[in-house]
Image (spheres, grey):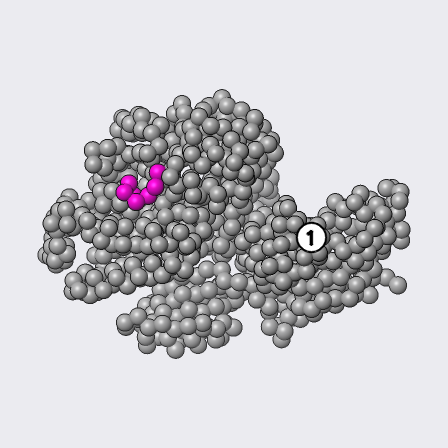
Amino acid sequence: MGARVKVVSEIEKIMGNIEQIRNIGIIAHVDHGKTTLSDSLLAAAGIISERIAGEALVLDFLSVEKKRGITVKSANISLYHEYQGKPYVINLIDTPGHVDFSGKVTRSLRVLDGAIVVVDAVEGVMTQTETVIRQALEERVRPLLFINKVDRLIKELKLPPEKIQERFIEIIRDVNNLIDMYGEPPFKKIWKLKPQEGTVAFGSAKDKWGISIPMVQKKGITFKEIIQAYASGKKEDVARLAKLMPVHETVLDMVVRFVPNPREAQKYRIPKIWKGDINTELGQAMLNADPNGPLVLFINDVRVEKTGLVATGRVFSGTLEPGREVYLLSANTKSRILQVSLYMGPFREVTKRVPAGNIAAVMGLSDVRAGETVVDPKYVDQAAPFEQLHYVSEPVVTIAVEPLRIQDLPKMIEALRKLTIEDPNLVVKINEETGEYLISGMGPLHLEIALTLLKENYGVEVKASQPIVVYRETVRTESPVYEGKSPNKHNKFYISVAPLNEETIELIQKGVITENMDPKERAKILRDKANWDYDEARRIWSIDEGINVFVDKTTGVQHLREVKDTILAAFRLATKEGPLAAEPVRGIKVILHDAIIHEDPVHRGPGQIYPAVRNAIWAGILSARPTLLEPLQKLDIRTPMEYVSNIAAIIARKRGRILEVLSQGMMARVIAEIPVAESFDLAAELRSATAGRAFWGVEFSRWAPVPDSMLEELIKKIRQRKGLPPHPPKVSDLIGP
């Protein structure tokens, strides 16, 4: 405890000097050793005892993480490190590696300037490694490389020094190719890994040693000595490596040298990640990370604790102090900061002020969610939320839950509310027909962890259904124009639907075009990049989050403006649950061609307009070759050559397809796509088909149409599960005579 207080007081002294601050994350594929590396860094920074580092997994402080040996939340820590006689504060976030938790990684990267990419020396660059590097580069976060588990190359594979060197070159080349592929032109050249300069470190986080080429030259160590230390079989020889070249020194020196300080980083990151006007006082304060400027805090993580909500975020401008009144942009509400603290792994140490460029924890913000932008109330007119975060995956698997004891229902509802505050990638809905509580997540593991947290953190035991795959409804052709009449026959809407092209879907997905953009600017982008007619694109009324667009092509319709909001609410209702199977609608354009609207507001309320608009949209969908889209997963499987045909057979049986097979020495790398619906028993099948010698990663790939031969049966099944009649409505049921 005393040591921790000492570290905190040292950190407080340095925090105000922005040149001595670094904000970094550790990112990697699941199981490549991120948390073990974090532990070794923590030990050195005086937070935990060195003896238990690597075993303690301090940042995995949830019991579910300890049991599974994986990280499911992002954990924060402020480290104290001296380089060339100068002290530095390194704010570190250890992020999850499993694909189901990629939302946490995205939010963490928003507050970082550099990332240590950890790669297992044996497994090499895997699917998730590629995903996290892509995410980092999209956020303009500089990647550095730590090749971990080098001891496996020596002990398990018994490779000679030249073969080990070849393996290193291969991994560095793979990472550089990704930087080349996903990096932006000015950065990819500067950020390419150059081992001789020291942007790559090699080592074993478990055995606590690490080395880089500049370190080798400085300390006069050869790789032969490292191999001999393991060959001797003596623990003390390996321990000597950790004393000679401690991993924390190598990695943290690399961070201090190559990760920019917050002021340097914000100069090029803010224009990319913040959509406000850079030329305002607020914009300039953020560009310069000005501690005396207006307060801007981006919240990347929220936890529910007994004492209330604890929000973690980065101060991009100004200084955080308890007692300050602030404004939450997304929640559109004022709040007051009650307490400010720094993270020490599972502990928080209270502090009086945290200046720009640092990461801190805040208490007192009642309506806060991850992704919130908190600003000084005086500058609300200059403020803009940080650009919407783009998650790599989206919720595609759902389970229905009910409490084991009926009296626990209120407790379960409250616990689910808290879970979604902590993890915005979990979606909770109530099925109105059946009264079921549905939780949707990124994959089966994401949901399994949510259930474990319900039990362990909130004391609620629940019964869960088998995982259900979430589908999307869409159309393949244009529909005729249908007349939707209100029940009182006084309002009529003439509507057609058409599919959106892939270019438009991608622009919406990436946030290049949004609902609240300037219509002319948006129309220009759609004309140039997605072949839209400029005039039609200017008339877009709404872009909903299911990636559907509403276009108003009417001219001179009286009272239309007065009912615009009601029409759009009806459009959102119609696309939230489509006509085929009450699944969300994706990728359609709804066009309003004409309308007749009653002059008396009494006759044109939601009760009249909702059914008229919805029925016309649904009729359009049903007559435009509707289909269901299913989520596909991308598989990246490494296996010995002789098992490739077994794997191909499994993939074919599961309606999958192999995209490519690459040979890497004695191993093959199979890249394939399979529907999520077919993937629930995949792990067991792959293990038995390869005698347990395959390892693989998965990530969300894309939405694809369900084969026509399965469509009717699948729609029937989903409708029956939801308590609906077995067949979708007909156009004639929706559009009366």
- Classify the position of the C terminus by image quarter: bottom right
Q: Which residues are magenta?
A: 255-261
Relative to residue 302, is residue 591 drawn left or right? right
Q: Which residue is mark 1?
A: 538
Relative to residue 701, is residue 143 drawn left or right? left
- For numbered disc 1, what is the local secondary structure? helix
Relative to residue 641, is residue 710 drawn left or right? right
Quick check: can you spot residue 464?
no
The amino acid on which the numbered mark 1 sits, given as a three-letter code, is Arg
| Residue at x 51% of width, y 50% of height | 390
Residue 525: horizontal and vertical position, in percent? 60, 55
Does 313 appear above or below 632? above
| Residue at x 45% of width, y 69% of height | 672
Residue 453: horizontal and vertical position, in percent? 47, 45
| Residue at x 19% of width, y 44% of height | 246
| Residue at x 27% of width, y 54% of height | 194
Residue 507: horizontal and vertical position, in percent? 57, 56
Does 147 appear above or below 341? below
Relative to residue 618, is residue 5 drawn left or right? left
- Classify the position of the N terminus by image quarter: top left
